[in-house]
Amino acid sequence: MSEKKIVKEYTNGEITVVWQPHMCTHSKNCWKGLLDVFDPRRKPWVDMNGATSDAIVAQVSKCPSKALSIK
Ligand code: SF4
């Protein structure tokens, strides 16, 4: 049985957020901190138009599990 790790990418043309759900520890930091971008009730749950690149980078840096990262 092969274990496939899902990796999703969301970009605004300037920065790309990388989302690796298997690493998420559900600290909820991301959507409590920046709901306009990270909203788990929405599909897709990441809206790169919800904030400035600086604000997104700052929020992603607070993800304790590194499930969210920037590339
Ligand atoms: S901040 Fe990181 S660990 Fe916490 S819910 Fe968001 S993605 Fe998951």
Image (tube, grey):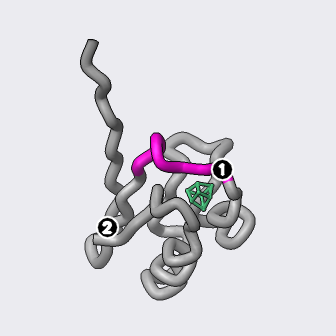
Of circles 2 and 1, which is in front? 1
Would you say residue 52 sits in the magenta stretch? no
Q: Is residue 19 above or below residue 70?
A: above
Label 1: which secondary element: loop
Would you say residue 24 sits in the magenta stretch? yes
Q: Is residue 18 above or below residue 6?
A: below
Label 2: which secondary element: strand
Disc 2 and disc 1: Cα gap in Å?
21 Å
x%, y% of residue 37?
A: 57, 64
Given contact means CB atoms under 8 Å apart, are the residues at marks 2 and 1 in contact?
A: no
Name the residue furthest right: 32
Specify which label sits upstream in the sequence, 2 or 1: 2
Q: Which residue shows up at 64% across the image and 46% down it?
A: 40
Residue under label 2, please give it. Answer: 16
Q: Quadrant of residue 7?
A: top left
**Amino acid residing under circle 2:** Thr
For residue 29, side relative to residue 3 (left or right):
right
**Amino acid residing under circle 1:** His
Residue under label 1, please give it. Answer: 26
Task: Quarter of the image for the N terminus: give it.
Answer: top left
x%, y% of residue 71?
A: 27, 71
Q: Which residue is nearer to you in this view: 25 or 21?
A: 25
Ligand 1: which quarter? bottom right
Q: Is residue 49 above or below residue 46?
A: below
